[in-house]
Image: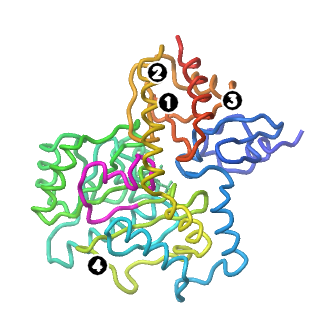
Amino acid sequence: MTTTKSIDKQYVLNTYNRFDLELVKGKGSLVYDESGTEYIDLTTGIGVTAFGIADEKWVEAVTNQLISLQHVSNLYYTSPCALLAKAICEKTSMSKVFFSNSGAEANECAIKVARKYASDKGYDRYNILTLNNSFHGRTLATLSATGQEHYHELFNPLPSGFVHADANDIDSVIRVAKEHNVCAIMMESVQGEGGVIALQCDFVQAVDKFAKENDILLIFDEVQTGNGRTGKLYGYMNFSVTPDVFTTAKGLGEGLPIGACVVGEKAQSVLGFGDHGSTYGGNPVACAGALSVIERIDDELLADVRKKSEYIFSELSNADGVESISGMGLMIGIKTTKPVSDVIKECMQNGVLCLSAKDKLRLLPALNIDFKLLKKAVEVIKSAVKN
Ligand SMILES: Cc1ncc(COP(=O)(O)O)c(C=O)c1O
């Protein structure tokens, strides 16, 4: 019999190890397979659908834009692009935004900003320091930036100019930065793909101080941690520091491809005409949807994210079969005694979709997940992790 699975297996390049599950529709934090079985979604398309599936305000914003102007190119002004950039800058006190289509592309832009900043200043610097165990994307430069050797091995030679230091070790950062004369330090506020590990506050503040004292750009990769995910609008806000550049994607788009490289005052004039570009970047439909998302991430929603986070931490920290729990806000990693693949399978059999990050169970529920659904999902997880 011809099924979606068999067609996909035959014609889609085999880069994803998909679950044996075809999802056909959803609403909010519930998704359904082709036979109508319901699942509570704690994956949000890997941190993307921050307001759940088919969120009404987002659908309305996207649909209204779609039927009036879907694309015109960056040769012309369009209001969703301008208004989204304004909203992001006003909410973060940053200065300017470049829009792309993904997290990796947003990081590529940040890398270009850092290199040109140094060259504009007349510094003989081009290396960018990132942290061991980081993840910054799948393009060649962002793979090089990613501080995990196993992502590099098969694709050498990778672009040069990236050096790595240990997270939460300021001596390591300072030593590597000085040794390689770096122009920027880039880090995730919570290492997502690396196992949902939050950076320590004193480390981040020490990196910020060192970077400022040496005119090294501080870049936060907020692709996964941005847009309310950690209980603050952007993850770096948990540490009371101000980056020179931050990048974001995933939750900003709510499901349409978008990435943003957001630049502060210091680097706002670095990229000029012709220095960077993207055919689809700033697309009116993606931007109109993203504007409807960013406008709704207010103090009330963020307080609710933190409340749900506390609930998950308190329920699962001491649960039978849980070794440790990490993360921030609704970005949570759980080290279980059982192999994580078994836990995910059991959760799925009991109607809850979860992710993994390295050897941990990873939860990225919608920011607005209904509390009753969350409680139901936590009970399923508790019983799945039990020895
Ligand atoms: C921190 C971080 N940076 C960059 C990326 C790459 O984003 P994208 O897959 O949209 O290119 C990811 C994706 O998981 C990420 O978590």
**Image label count:** 4
For marks 2 and 1, give the CA distance.
7 Å
What residue did someone put label 4 on? 270
Task: Pick whichever of labels 2 and 3 is earlier in the sequence.
Answer: 2
Task: Pick whichever of labels 2 and 1 is earlier in the sequence.
Answer: 2
- Circle 3: residue type: Gly
Q: Nearer the viewer, residue 206 or 373?
A: 373
What residue did someone put label 3 on? 351
Residue at the far front: name it. 300
Eye-nearest disc, 2 or 3: 3
Eye-nearest disc, 3 or 1: 3
What residue did someone put label 1 on? 361
What residue did someone put label 2 on? 336
Label 4 secondary element: loop
Q: What span is colored magenta in the figure?
A: 227-247
The quadrant the N terminus occupies is top right
Eye-nearest disc, 4 or 1: 1
Label 1 secondary element: strand
* Image-based side of 382 in relation to 231, left or right: right
Q: Is residue 238 in the magenta section?
A: yes
For marks 3 and 1, give the CA distance.
16 Å
The answer to whether mark 2 and mark 3 are in CB contact below 8 A is no
- Rendered location of residue 105, percent (x, y): 45, 64
For marks 4 and 3, give the CA distance.
49 Å
Label 2 secondary element: strand
